[in-house]
Amino acid sequence: MKTALQQVFHSRKFVTGFAIFMAILLTVFLYPLIIQDEPLAILGQGNFFPPGIYVNIYDSIHSKSYVLNLKDAASKRIGKILTDQSRQDIKEWLVSYGVPEDQIDINDTESLLSQWEENYDSSISLPGMTFAKQRYFQRLDESVNGLLSSEGVVISEVNQETGNLDQTNTIDQSEYVHINEVANVRILPLGTDNFGRDVLTELVKATGVSLKIGLIAGVVATLIGLTLGLLSGYVGGLVDDIIMFVTNLFTVIPSFVLLILISFSIGQDNRGATTIAVVIGLTSWVWTARAVRSQVISLRNRDHVNLSKLSGHSTAHIILNDILPYIASYVVMALILQVSSAILSEASLSILGLGPRTTEVPTLGLMMNWAMIYQAHILGKWWAYFPVIVVIALITFSMNLMNTGLDQVFNPTLRD
Amino acid sequence: MAEEKKPCLCGSGLTKIYGTGVQKNVAVDHVDFDCCQNEVISIVGESGSGKTTLAKMLLGLTKPTEGEIYFQGKKRDISNMKKKKEYWKRIQAIFQDPYSSFNTFNKIDAVLLDCIAMRNGKKYTRAKKIEIMEEACCFVNLEFDELTNKYPFELSGGQMQRLMIARVFILKPEILIADEPTSMIDACSRATILEMLMKLRKEIGMTIIFITHDIGLAYYISDTVFIMERGKIVESGPAEQVILHPKEEYTRRLISDVPKIHEEWDLSSVKYG
């Protein structure tokens, strides 16, 4: 036993897979201890906030200000709004308005903006310009308005007694706040999803739930498959015929179709994560049963089994002590594959909208489903679905890697 | 043997057929045989002649397709677990391959303790059990202190086969079926094993059914010899009569196939295919 474990942990493939899997598992356990948000709490008003650091504007105004005279501050400010693309667009508009092309220099910000201010009129519709394009230029005009001013911003508050605006503060362009002194800064490493929920927190919770579903489904499938396989392989005869008949029936009907039908007939309200897991387990035991049966058939005529019979042991004792240990490594490998395929099954089921009900817990499949319904893939909101895909891929990859590693340890002929 | 001959294990019309239709394979074909108490009986034949299948039927590990087995004059009844257990207290076996005969997950102690439990139930104290195990190991020239807490695969082939004999020593059955017990071990250990089997026979007075492909060995140890060819018993009788004056062509071939040290090995009888 000890030497077997040592061998397993010398297999590079197994160790890599194990490390990835443990990293995922640790994150699932440790993350909620550090960030104690409700995974399904709606933080953002609006959908798909991009990943990044969110600094509270109100708190920034009231924080202590530091004056930093930085040379390129103004040009950065302008550059953020007046990108190369928008300079090109301004030039395009001016040219089609009638300004001679050689008079326009898109690298000279000042003259470009003054030309724009002189000529642009939002009411003018140039020939051949779509409405969308027209709206784009209106927005562009608004954003470049006052871009070159060097005045500060005046902060006013409503005086409760008089109802007038009292000027309380002016903020110069060269004023800064220290980010640690701003009371409210929120890092959203993966932005928010369509409901305005923090994607990372949700993802960690979803990974945990999906792993749980995978484990329950894998254990259920392996237990059923193991029991039926052992019985049909060892007992043989009529028992074998009946079990193989049922197994063949399940083999012929694609288990995914069965899964869809069962979870549809259960109904949305009764579909909790555990129910889905059990249903997945109930439909995927077939291959384990067949594989275990064939292994047991080759084992049952070995001499050590005969010797155990001659020592007067009962059938149950022989199955547990003389058959099971010999196929244990095989069963563990089958279990790993069952778990990873159950996670995939849950994901595919949820994408079709047949997964667990959506009100309690997120799962990896449900996150994909939400992202798909709200067209994250069309809108280019990659953070809503890409991390989910990566996590699913990592889980299945690590488990398959562990499986291959184990396979090579227990079947030395496979080693390359 | 001067004692009165009592029949102890007989078979009539024993047949075992594997598979059906095209794949039908008659492993043992209407074999009649009987053996008497305290004899050493050899069943000799080449590979695939059905010796091992016959042994398994006699042991009750496989059901005969046809035919009956009579145990001590009565029809053998092993219809349920309890009767099987009773039967196996009286008939035991040593298998061909010592390396695959033991469960590699159980320690050696477990193998011997199983036998003690089978023979005496669970009434012995721990100290008494150890005494019995020590006695058994001593009988086969093994040190119990070295074996305890070891796994069977840590032993050599010869040691494992001796452990098998220790098992039989504890169980003291009436019949022992030894299925080529020496074919997987080297020539030196072979003599030791045979010697121990004979010593054990003398000690507890049991019948040995010795299954082998080596007709020389059969001649050396047995009282009665059965020659098996393709599932049938073609010749039988006292060892001397069968081997020194063989009637069947097949028996003659088996005898000429035994390599001899001082003569040219006669390969003329070898058939290919």
Image (spheres, rainbow, N blue to C red):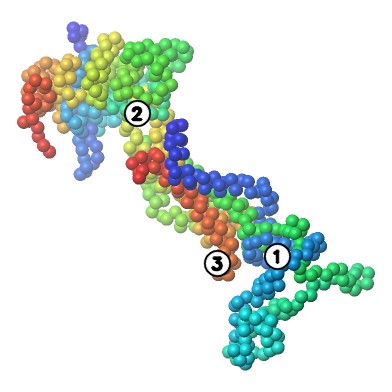
| Residue that carries the numbered disc 1 in the rendered image | A45
- The local secondary structure at tag 2 comes to helix
Residue A184 vertical placement versus B179 (above, below): below
* Residue A220 shows in the view: no
Q: Chain of mark 1?
A: A
| Labels 1 and 2 positioned on one and the same chain | yes
In percent of the image, x 32 and y 13: which residue is there?
B141
Instruction: Please tell me which of labels 1 and 3 falls first in the chain.
Output: 1
Q: From mark 3 to mark 2, how far is it between C-alphas?
A: 59 Å
Q: Nearer the viewer, residue B75 or A256?
A: A256
Label 3 sits on residue = A377
What is the secondary structure assignment of the residue under circle 3?
Answer: helix
Task: Please state which of the two labelled residues, at mark 1 or mark 2, is closer to the viewer.
Answer: 1
First-in-chain label (1 vs 2): 1
Q: Chain of mark 2?
A: A
Same subunit under labels 1 and 3? yes
